[in-house]
Amino acid sequence: MSDPRAAKDAARAQARARRDSLSDDRLRVFAADALRDRFLEELVRPGLIPDGPVAGYWPLGSELDVRPLLLHLRTGGLKSGGRSIALPVSGPRGQALTFRDWDPALPLAAGRYGIQEPGADRPEVVPAVLLVPMLAFDRSGHRLGYGAGYYDRTLDALRALRPVLAVGMAFAAQEMDAVPCGAHDERLDWILTERETLRFTQ
């Protein structure tokens, strides 16, 4: 019988190498801008995302940069005005993430994994929309994370409190035929790439 954990570890190694190979700065800037525009045109303007705070992430390594979108949402580039924007704060492994309000004018601090996070003085936020990074995705709405389970536990906890829209953000090249997944893996509602928008819930 195959080992599901070994299958996931092998898939992670392959997916990380593929994402790391996307080193062209022009592609990265294009993808960040394309996802910002796609999110606004295809989710926000048609009214397909709920009101309330949007939680993004500070890009780590070769992750797709969602900061252009977060800045646009926060500064009120939309007629509806600005939104509260939050970034995750990593706690102990195995626990759900918490989120704090992000003010780009204030300094950030290095968190548990060296990722930039809002300081402890920033208010905690419960997001209505969660932008989710990943190593890989498939066309069933499954994502491959880093193995710590942060986002799966976070989505499980948030969905127990209130509806939350989970939007995966990835390069098109991160697609896999089938992501190895288990019973506790949370499915995404949408996945956006620089090439297309995939919807998994109505």
Image: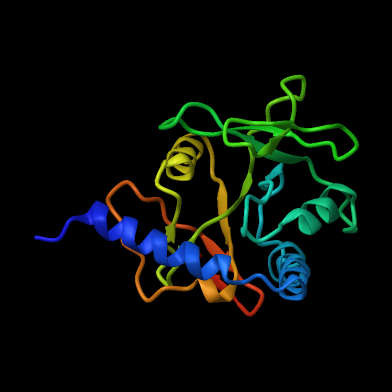
On screen, residue 82 above or below 187 = above
**Residue at the farthest top position:** 121
Q: Extreme left residue here?
A: 1
Q: How is the image coloured?
A: rainbow
Name the image quarter holding the N terminus: bottom left
Question: Where is residue 41, by image quadrant?
Answer: bottom right
Q: Is residue 54 left or right of residue 163?
A: right
Residue 148 rendering spot, x and y as whole percentages: 42, 41
Confirm whether residue 199 shows in the render. Answer: no
Task: Between residue 80 and residue 120, name the one nearer to us.
Answer: 120
Query: Who is closer to the viewer here, 67 or 191?
Result: 67
So how many labels did they put on this image?
0
Q: Is 26 placed above or below 44 here?
A: below
Whether residue 65 is situated above or below residue 158 in the rendered picture: below
Task: Answer left or right for 197 relative to 80.
Answer: left
Rendered position, 113 above or below 135: above
Where does residue 176 sit, x and y in percent of width and height?
Answer: 42, 73
Residue at 72% across / 69% down in the picture?
28
The part of the image, by quadrant, that contains residue 115 is top right
Q: Is residue 21 left or right of residue 10?
A: right
Tell me: 191 left or right of 48.
left
Tell me where residue 193 appears, x and y as whole percent. Answer: 62, 71
Q: What x and y, as percent, mark residue 183? A: 27, 50
Tell me, yes or no, if residue 144 can be seen here: yes
Residue in the picture at 76% in, 74% down: 30
Residue situated in front as seen by the camera: 14 or 38:
14
- Residue drawn 75% across and 70% down? 25
Q: Residue at x 87, y 58 (%)?
A: 78
